[in-house]
Image (cartoon, rainbow, N blue to C red):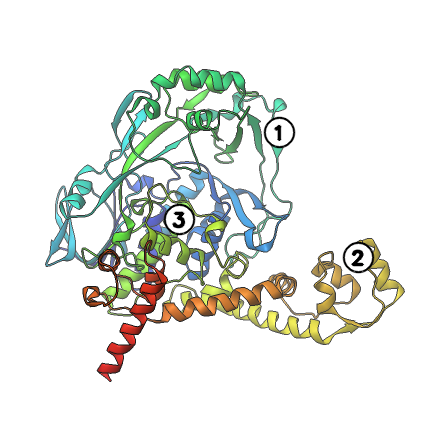
Amino acid sequence: MENFDVIVIGAGHAGIEASLSSARLGAKTLMLTLDINSIGKMSCNPAIGGVGKGQLVKDVDAIGGAMGKAADACAIQFRILNSSKGAAVQSSRAQIDMRKYNRYMQGLLKRQKKLKIKEAEVKKLIVRDGQVQGVITEAEEIYSKAVVICPGTFLDGLIHVGLKHFSGGRINERASVALADNLKDLGFNLLRFKTGTCPRLNKKTIDYRKLIKQDGDLIPKPFSFSTISMKRKQVPCYITYTNNQTHEIIRNNLDRSPLYSGAITATGVRYCPSIEDKIVKFADKARHQVFLEPQGLNVVEIYPNGISTSLPEDVQLKLIHSIEGLEKTEVIRFGYGIEHVVVDPTQLYPTLETKRIKNLYLAGQINGTTGYEEAAAQGLIAGINAVLRVKNREPFILDRASSYIGVLIDDLTTKGTTEPYRMFTSRVEYRLIIREDNADLRLSKMGFDLGLVNKKDYRKTKQKEQGIKDGLVFLKQTHIKPGHKVNAILAKLNCTPINRQMSLGSLLKRPEVSIKDLNLIHRLKPGILESAWQQIEIEVKYAGFIQRQLKDVERFKHLEKIKLPTDFDYSQLPGISREIKEKLLKFKPLSLGQASRISGITPVAISLLMVYLRKINAQRQ
């Protein structure tokens, strides 16, 4: 019988990051999957990144995860979303060759030392004395010191197409029913969420003359901080819209929709609703955008983002043919809805270990999230913490002021979610200082100290860091005098001319002046990376706002530093209501900061808790 340090159940985006981080940190790791050929399969749209999601990918990459590098290797179009807005909300998004991504991830995992991949369905967890010790498959018992469950939508998945429904984790792939039953038997509070996907169209049968073409950025910006350059063919996406005829077809067939006939009872994704949901909930809208995304360079399928649906196949065909440019389009595969089991994430610590069973970690859609990026972020953290637990080392926890990953996990474990959770920049209160562009500066040292970021990449980050310091000093100390050349350039920028000596830093503060413009006025200090100059520009232009946020972060960190033992007896707290005591006992917060973010915990309760902690500490001394 073979034993492992860590077993990872699942081979989606969470399972990949968990397995790779575990093995790369030196743990003997086993990945169990229902189908080896499905490793890294993109179940839904052929894209990585987006608003808030691009930041997650950058965080994952900076710590040493795989998704950013894989996206760069397999992308066929790059775009920066919100490029006309401030740096805090700019987000990367890339169209991905789905088959290439699938092959890339399979190859990466198969080459990874200390990682074994095996096809098997996990039926039960082996749990003794409140601690997981392995898994039971249909054929054997496999023992380990920690287990990470990353099942995606496979956990008791139920697929809906019209009024037909059948068990499945993805179309034509079986669900994991026994494991869901086992989690229920083990006492976990389970929920059911619903998601869905769009039909797939034959690109050769689309009339592109009627569509709006959308190209990628002229100069693509990679996800990974280790990617030096990308010179490859980029392909366009196309935009079309639904219309009154489309909406009428859907309204006339709502009685055949599992969403509106009562067949689906689970909670769906608010921010990515099905087309039938859009028509009902936004009845005043005359049209809805359909974004046609290529699934690869040598792939015939097109993904019509915006018409996710579980309507019957004949209705799907009618509504597709009613859309401009799609009148004669051939459907390769119809869309469907899927219900699956979710574990209430408030039953987890910020390490993603369950509170109920020691050494058991959960990551991805099982925690109530939706999206590849959210899954990858959780998988990375769960894999890291599983190994740290095995090695009896301190856990790895990211807070809200350090990363988007920290916000994601804190939201889930502290607030929970009653609907599929999706990351947005609006969820992040310190988004001006935890941007996409500085993820390496924030997180790569952590990744390096863990052993996930190599010396070469970390050296590059240190070079960038030093470049920022040198550049800021250069801008502060270098002054220019009024003159025809300077003011002529400023005039072209619709910028007020200068009439006195001014530092380059002061000039860069002007909204009309970019770092490139500044280089025309006075040659910038050589030897500083372009990425460092980008950081410098942001630091200079947003200096006041950044300083205010840093002060907010200091206050936040004060509460985060005050740790709470997991076995703390809240029932003994004087002056606090029974309801608050029960919540604290249920959530078992790891810090005073986390306790303060639990719904219903009042500022007075936090103050009393702080006083009580000081009293206990004084007595111990």
Residue at the image position 81 percent from the left and 73 percent from the top? 501
Q: Position of residue 55 (x, y in %)?
A: 49, 53
Q: Whole-Å distance between the Cαs marked 3 and 1?
A: 30 Å
Callout 1 amino acid: Ile
Q: Earlier in the sequence, mark 3 or mark 1?
A: 1
Cα–Cα span, label 2 and label 1: 35 Å
Left or right of residue 477: residue 261: left
Where is mark 2, residue-wise?
495
Q: Nearer the viewer, residue 322 or 17?
A: 322
Q: Which mark is residue 212?
A: 1
Element under disc 1:
strand
Q: Residue furthest right?
A: 484
Q: Is residue 616 above or below residue 425?
A: below
Point out the residue furthest to the left here: 129
Q: Earlier in the sequence, mark 2 or mark 1?
A: 1
Q: In this orientation, which residue lies closer to the viewer: 179 or 162?
A: 162
Tell me the element at label 3: helix
| Label 3 neighbour load within 10 Å: few <14, some 14-19, many 20+ | many
Of pointers 3 and 2, the one earlier in the residue sequence: 3
Amino acid, disc 3: Glu
For badge 2, the amino acid type reads Cys
**In front: mark 3 or mark 2?**
2
Viewer-proximal residue among 408 and 9? 408
Which residue sits at x=36%, y=27%? 336
Question: At numbered mark 2, what does the secondary structure look like: helix, strand or loop?
Answer: loop
Q: Which residue is rendered at x = 70% and y = 63% of the image? A: 509
Instruction: Identify the residue shown where x is 25% and y is 66%.
Output: 575
**Which residue has dot 3 on it?**
374
